Amino acid sequence: MVALDSLYAMLARPVKQVVKRKRVVEQTEHTDPIHADSHEAPQSQLPPHLERRRHGERRINSRPGREDRRGQARRQQAQKQAEEEALDSPLPRIDIDV
């Protein structure tokens, strides 16, 4: 029987070097070169024709039900009502400073 190394030596072929040429990239002619000194993002500046919103055109409170998302108005109203009831109460008010 033939040993594996002798069988490999008979059948093995030498490694061929494969050379692929790098593809040639053509430089475009009609583009502005990128400035190496510019470190800001490409769209960091606003365009000159951008208009600011007026105070009455705010989108924050434009939809119904959006003006009190956290229930702040209800809490303030409940607190005000509790203060009025405490003032109208016949019981004496006791302040304790801690």
Image (spheres, helix red, strand yellow):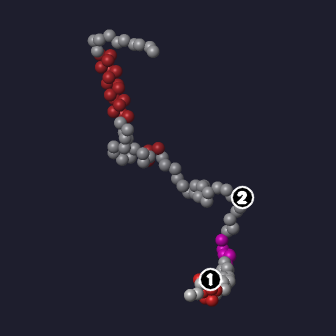
Residue 40 place in picture, x, y as percent: 64, 55
Residue 65 drawn at (x, y percent):
33, 43
| Residue 56 highlighted magenta (yes or no) | no
Say which quarter of the image contains residue 36: bottom right
- Residue reaching furthest front? 1
Give the magenta range. 26-31
Mark 2: amino acid: Asp
Residue at the extreme left: 90
Residue that label 2 marks: 37
Q: Which label was assigned to residue 5?
A: 1
Q: Quadrant of residue 61?
A: top left
The alpha-carbon separation of the residues under discs 1 and 2 comes to 62 Å
Label 2 packing within 10 angstroms: few (<14), some (14-19), many (20+): few
Question: Image check: 18 left or right of 73?
Answer: right
| Point 66% across, 80% down: residue | 23
Does the CB distance between marks 1 and 2 fall below 8 Å? no
Q: Quadrant of residue 19?
A: bottom right
Which residue is rendered at x = 34% and y = 21% of the image? 83
Left or right, 77 with respect to 51, comes to left
Rendered-image quadrant of the C terminus: top left
Q: Amino acid at mark 1?
A: Asp
